[in-house]
Amino acid sequence: MRASARFFFVPRNDGLWNVPLPILPIELRRPHGRFLPTQGLLDSGATVSVLPYRLGLQLGASWDETTTRVMLGGNLHGEARVVLLEARVAGFDPVVLTFAWTQSERAPLILGQINFFQSFDVHFQASRRQYHVDVASRFDAQYRSGVSPSCLRKAATKALVLA
């Protein structure tokens, strides 16, 4: 497993501003599925990680069969469903991440505190327009300790519901 990975901010233009953002290449999959490469915005100010509706469908999720519900606030105000996905970043071992899957068509893939920033240490160097990602040492030990997927699901769902 890699010790650290370095990434560069990506320029994004929203019509008014040309702003470099920490966009992370990441691969996601549902259990027993194939990894799908995509990109997510690292947002340390977001409480939860958000999965856009279309991406969830591409990964094989079914809105009607995903029954655990949470409410989103802010710009994405509305109902979302809890989805657990396996994620692979750079050369790191895959980890299970919890997402609030929204039906909003304008939602980007957001990697937030629950549980991306609990799984990875991210070191921003905004003046250099780069950032480094490491597996969180506490999480690494817990992840390798054999915590069952059902325990992860219960803990992650509880954290999302309380957020």
Image (spheres, rainbow, N blue to C red):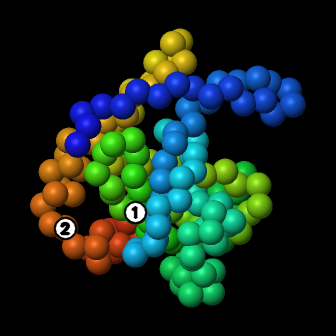
Q: Nearer the viewer, mark 2 or mark 1?
A: 1
- Taking depth in this image into account, of 71 and 140 the one nearest to the observer is 140
Q: Quadrant of residue 132?
A: top left
Q: Name the residue nearer the viewer: 157 or 8.
A: 8
Left or right side of 69 for 96: left
Q: Residue at x 49, y 21 (%)?
A: 130
Q: Is residue 121 above or below residue 127?
A: below
Residue 26 at x, y percent in the picture = 49, 48
Across and down, in percent, residue 140 comes to 21, 49
**How far separated are the C-alphas under marks 2 and 1?**
14 Å
Identify the disc placed on residue 86: 1
Question: In terms of sequence position, does the residue under pointer 2 or pointer 1 come before the other?
Answer: 1
**Residue 44 horizontal side relative to residue 147, left or right:** right
Image: 140 above or below 151: above
What amino acid is found at the position of numbered circle 1 in the picture? Glu
Q: Residue at x 51, y 80 (%)?
A: 68
